[in-house]
Image (spheres, helix red, strand yellow):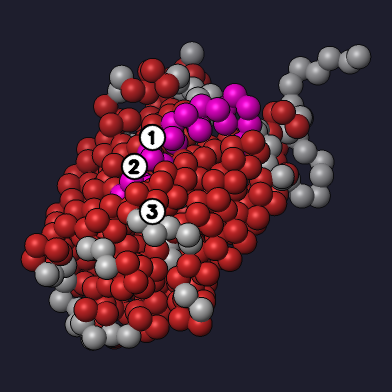
Amino acid sequence: MANHAGPVPSTRPLFYGWIIVAASFVILFAYVFMSNSAGVFFKPMLTEMGWSRGTTAAAFAISTLISGVAAPWMGILSDKYGPRLMEIVSAVFLAGGFALTAFSHSLLQLYVSYGLLIGLASGAMWTPVAATVACWFEARRGFAISLVQAGAGLGTIVGPPLSTYVIYRWDWRFAFLVLGVTMGLLTFVGAQFLRSNPQAMGLLPDGGYKRMAAAKATTRSIPSARNVSVGEALRGWPFWQVFSVHGVGSFAQQVIVVHLVAAATDREITPAVAATFFSVAGITNITGKLVMGYVSDRIGRRISLTISLSLAVAAMLWLSLASVPWMFYVFALVWGFAYGSWIPMFPAITGDLFGVRSLGGIFGLITMGNAIGGAAGAFVAGAIFDKAQSYTFVFFLAAALLVAGIVLVLLLKDPKRQGRQAASSMEKA
């Protein structure tokens, strides 16, 4: 048997990395279709079951926390056994969790079916996908991940209005059962096309033209010269900065996902109209991912992330004043772009900073920040409303936390600059 020195550039008409992107797009669409529809299920559940907003929102908080606890382990298992297995696990938990939620009649049942099972589905879904796409691309990493995240944007556009239609045509239980199982099946299908890395298929990242692209343009995002272990990452300040920024972003995101429809209907906006706010946000969400994913490969993640978080602060402050539909639509336009644009940057900046050797485990740990912040956002917003009968303070709190996130981003060492310095040192050596 002939021995090969290493992977060779692909001669196929289509680089398999783009198949990875397409499969990941489908997986993320399926999950976000249901997760970002949570807000339209919220009040129908409250009406039937008579629970308070705080105790009901706790189910979403538990789900987010479980996701954060599971994500590092799922990332490590993905590094070891491959992403395909992890996404099959995610599909099973996704379909099973939503199906059991449809039959929940107590808070304990809800906390197990939605909190535990959907949390495990989330932990097994995003981390392996993000790490896998980052392994298949370097020079185009930000853009590739942004294409995958466009699936989330499409899920946000389609999920809430379709879920609203099914809920009011039948009921929320039927919607959870039928839509949840369907999205679980889509996740299972997408999982069949995933492969761990290009080297395993005799390919190079970016389809074999990575070297040429990196040599041509100094404006591109330069991959990290390091491939650090999980332990090395944990001992460095950049890990905790990215961890914290992910957390404050998720706090604000879960406030919106779980409570926006409730906040709008409190102001005498119909549920059908309120659901369309997510559709509008979904459109600009996709735009934000594609535009800022491309831009971040050229101007760097730090500047791009600062822009995204600043737009989110402005959107939150505007939401605190919103009282009529057009004001909510303005919020949705800005928020969708901001939130959509920062999500792909987290796995990309993680790969830039730490390399791809242990990317699944490292990014999984970083998503714990996302989980902690998201759980706090969903629960704290509901608890504050139960006390104050208003979301105004919640929106101000989310804006303040996003400002803190901007400060942390500005203090983060630019991985692009680090990459240039490492490349320069290697050339001198």
Q: Which residue is mark 1?
A: 69
Looking at this rendering, what residue extends furthest in the front direction?
105
Q: Can residue 252 be seen by looking at this rendering? A: no
Residue 90 vs residue 421, the one in the foreground: 90
- Is 65 left or right of 381, judged from the image as shown? right
Residue 313 within the segment the image draws in magenta: no
Q: Quadrant of residue 5?
A: top right
In terms of secondary structure, what is the magenta stretch mainly?
Answer: helix
Residue span colored magenta: 61-83
Amino acid identity at mark 3:
Leu
Cα distance in 3D space between marks 1 and 3: 19 Å
* Mark closer to the chain start, 3 or 2: 2
User: Residue sitting at 32 percent across and 85 percent down?
Assistant: 270
Q: Which residue is mark 2?
A: 65
Circle on res. 110: 3
User: Residue sitting at 76 percent across and 30 percent down?
Assistant: 202
In this rendering, which labeled residue sits more in front, label 1 or label 3?
A: 3
Q: Can residue 4 be seen by looking at this rendering? A: yes
In this rendering, which labeled residue sits more in front, label 3 or label 2?
A: 3
Contact check, label 1 and label 2, Cβ < 8 Å: yes
User: Residue sitting at 34 percent across and 42 percent down?
Assistant: 65
Amino acid identity at mark 1:
Val
Quarter in which the N terminus is drawn: top right
Contact check, label 1 and label 3, Cβ < 8 Å: no
